Image: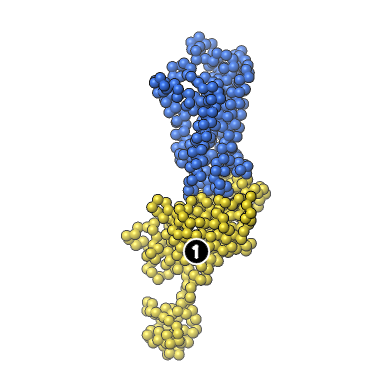
Chain colours: A yellow, B blue
């Protein structure tokens, strides 16, 4: 029908994408690119517009303005979409009375793939035993795996997953990481949304962070980590700051010590020794992506619009302080308050 | 399009709904044919209300075989509603539109599938009603297949069931809550329409509108009698006009539903 080849490299381009529901702007002038053959994490707190963006990309929601294309074409214009783009949006999209196998067979009829492929996919995601059980009795983890099987059914070049780690236990998350890496290793393009950076930090190559429907950061994981800093304490801080300054290293006071713009601890220690300044503590700052994510999405201008603007969220940490070492920042960990549309 | 149709058929036959419905359709067809057959052939009734009874064996056979059609078309109406209602309720509409992003094509596939499913249940219903009805008629000394027009009625009842399924499809989209859609549609067909017919019987111009009501058009299509509130037969359209009216209802409802589905945001 069309001269454009069905199987392009798999580049996703979002340009000026905007969606308003009445007076509420869910997605606001969003721009980003997902490079072919890479895993891109699409991050933001609950209600920041991730799901709306993905649904616009997949032709389910009509954008108010802007475009979302896959290899230059909108989803609706792809002739056999399941063989080009595989997606799993929610783990609840199953008829409770239909078995996993039959759910996939319904899709297989459209994708034009044989039933043997259905059984292969169930095997691949590790739920062959559930194939003939009705989906109503599935755990969240099984639903996620079934969704993944559906996304892979047409052997697509591009895979789009919305919160694939939701509801998975730690073992399931580890399995998912390995699985996504495996898919990327086959040269596929992956776009994975999450409201928890820690879930995807070890998996993704690139990161797009949005807050309140606007992009607040985009880049590789390494870029977002930024330049390393160290923390040093001393009984003679001014002298130490002076010595560092003479060595061309900037620093600024923090708590009862200094934040030093360098990751080279040995060099800092040598400078202190040469200046005769006693050092009480010297450590590298954890450049925690989680902290960056938290700062980006919780700064005053990006404060979550879904909460009251009058009082500060009660559990918000003071600025500059590290979030808890594991898990989500407390103020975004509210899955029951899911307001994604 | 044929892939989308195959997918729709797979959807329908992979839940328990279809065989539950099949049993209900078969039993109601057989039961109503039996009841109608026994009543219309009883000697006690013949003297009293002769005007409201079928006069020929052919009319009698049609009335008996389509005795359960009112239940039958309510069931296919419900199937039409659930065809789209359950997709919204269980959010499977998302994966449906991801597989076939051209939504008009999805709706077209649903229309074709529902016509097929309506005919499928029509066959099941007729197996029940003709089996039971022919036995009663023969036992009471009437001819079971006396006239060719009986076969036309049987064939048209398949069409009728398919068309009511399409009316349901439209209702299922226009009323987003599946349970509400079922209650409202069945309420309209069983309660509102008879009341409307009764009200329309009062003014003189009412009799020009009544034949165009859906269940009146259904009776006209099947060539069966429908009694007015006073027991007198009301004016009816010819069978093909009745069929056209019913098709118009189906087209309007399915068309409105499609128009709305194509535009809706699926979130």
Q: What is the x, y in percent for residue B45? A: 51, 12
Compare residues B200 and B113 and report the one nearer the observer: B200
At x 61%, y 46%, the residue is A110
Q: What is the x, y in percent for residue A72? A: 57, 58
Q: Is residue B1 visible?
A: yes
Compare residues A81 and A262 and report the one nearer the observer: A81
Residue furthest toward the top?
A: B47
Name the quadrant containing residue A99: top right
Q: How many marks?
A: 1
In the rendered view, tell whether residue A280 sits above or below residue A221. below
Residue furthest toward the left?
A: A310
In the rendered view, tell whether residue B224 sits above or below residue A53. above
Residue furthest toward the front?
A: A3
In the rendered view, tell whether residue A103 sits above or below residue A191. above
At numbered mark 1, what does the secondary structure look like: helix, strand or loop?
A: strand
Instruction: Report crowding for label 1: few under 14, some 14 to 19, many 20 or more residues within 10 A (C-alpha).
Output: many
Which residue position holds label 1? A208
Q: What is the x, y in percent for residue A69? A: 54, 57
Q: Is residue A137 visible?
A: no
At x 53%, y 23%, the residue is B220
At x 59%, y 62%, the residue is A36
Chain letter for the residue marked with disc 1 in the picture: A
In the rendered view, tell whether residue B228 sits above or below residue A183. above
At x 58%, y 40%, the residue is B109
């Amino acid at each position: 029908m069309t001269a454009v080849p069905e199987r392009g490299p798999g580049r996703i381009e979002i340009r000026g994408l905007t969606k308003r529901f009445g007076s509420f702007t869910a997605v606001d002038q969003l721009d980003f690119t997902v490079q072919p053959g890479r895993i891109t994490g699409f991050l933001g707190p609950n209600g920041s517009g991730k799901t709306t963006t993905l649904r616009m990309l997949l032709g389910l929601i009509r954008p108010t303005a802007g475009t979302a294309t896959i290899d230059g074409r909108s989803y609706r214009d792809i002739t056999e979409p399941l063989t080009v783009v595989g997606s799993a949006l929610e783990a609840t999209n199953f008829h409770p009375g239909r078995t996993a196998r039959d759910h996939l067979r319904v899709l297989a009829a459209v994708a034009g793939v044989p039933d043997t492929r259905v059984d292969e996919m169930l095997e691949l995601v590790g739920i062959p035993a559930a194939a003939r059980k009705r989906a109503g009795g599935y755990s969240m983890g099984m639903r996620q795996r079934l969704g993944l099987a559906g996304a892979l059914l047409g052997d697509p070049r591009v895979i789009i997953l919305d919160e694939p780690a939701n509801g998975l236990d730690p073992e399931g998350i580890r399995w998912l990481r390995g699985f996504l890496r495996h898919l990327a290793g086959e040269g596929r393009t992956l776009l994975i949304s999450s409201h928890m950076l820690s879930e995807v930090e070890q998996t993704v190559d690139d990161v797009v962070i949005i807050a309140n429907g606007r992009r607040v950061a985009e880049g590789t994981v390494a870029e977002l980590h930024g330049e390393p800093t160290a923390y040093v304490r001393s009984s003679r801080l001014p002298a130490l700051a002076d010595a560092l300054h003479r060595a061309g290293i900037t620093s600024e006071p923090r708590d009862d010590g200094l934040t030093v713009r360098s990751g080279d601890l040995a060099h800092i220690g040598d400078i202190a020794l040469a200046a005769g300044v006693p050092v009480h503590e010297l450590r590298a700052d954890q450049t925690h992506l989680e902290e960056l994510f938290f700062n980006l999405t919780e700064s005053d201008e990006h404060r979550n619009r879904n909460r009251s603007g009058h009082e500060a969220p009660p559990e918000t940490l003071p600025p500059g302080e590290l979030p808890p070492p594991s898990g989500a920042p407390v103020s975004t960990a509210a899955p029951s308050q899911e307001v994604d549309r | 399009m044929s892939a989308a149709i195959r997918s729709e058929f797979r959807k329908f036959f992979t839940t328990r709904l279809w065989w539950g419905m099949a049993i209900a359709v078969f039993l109601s067809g057989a039961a109503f044919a039996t009841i109608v057959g026994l009543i219309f052939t009883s000697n006690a009734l013949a003297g009293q209300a002769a005007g409201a009874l079928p006069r020929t064996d052919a009319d009698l056979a049609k009335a008996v075989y389509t005795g359960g059609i009112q239940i039958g078309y309510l069931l296919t109406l419900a199937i039409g509603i659930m065809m789209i209602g359950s997709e919204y309720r269980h959010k499977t509409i998302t994966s449906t539109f991801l597989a076939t992003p051209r939504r008009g094509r999805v709706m077209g596939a649903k229309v074709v599938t529902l016509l097929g499913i309506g005919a499928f249940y029509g066959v099941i219903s007729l197996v029940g009603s003709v089996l039971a009805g022919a036995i009663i008629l023969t036992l009471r000394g009437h001819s079971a297949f006396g006239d060719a027009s009986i076969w036309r009625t049987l064939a048209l009842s398949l069409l009728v069931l398919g068309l009511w399924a399409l009316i349901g499809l439209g209702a299922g989209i226009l009323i987003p809550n599946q349970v509400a859609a079922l209650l409202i549609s069945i309420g309209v067909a069983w309660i509102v329409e008879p009341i409307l017919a009764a009200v329309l019987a009062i003014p003189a111009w009412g009799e020009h509108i009544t034949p165009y009501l859906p269940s009146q058009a259904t009776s006209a299509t099947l060539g069966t009698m429908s009694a007015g509130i006073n027991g007198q037969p009301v004016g009816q359209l010819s069978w093909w006009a009745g069929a056209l009216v019913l098709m118009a209802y189906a087209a309007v409802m399915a068309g409105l539903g499609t128009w709305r589905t194509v535009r809706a945001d699926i979130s």
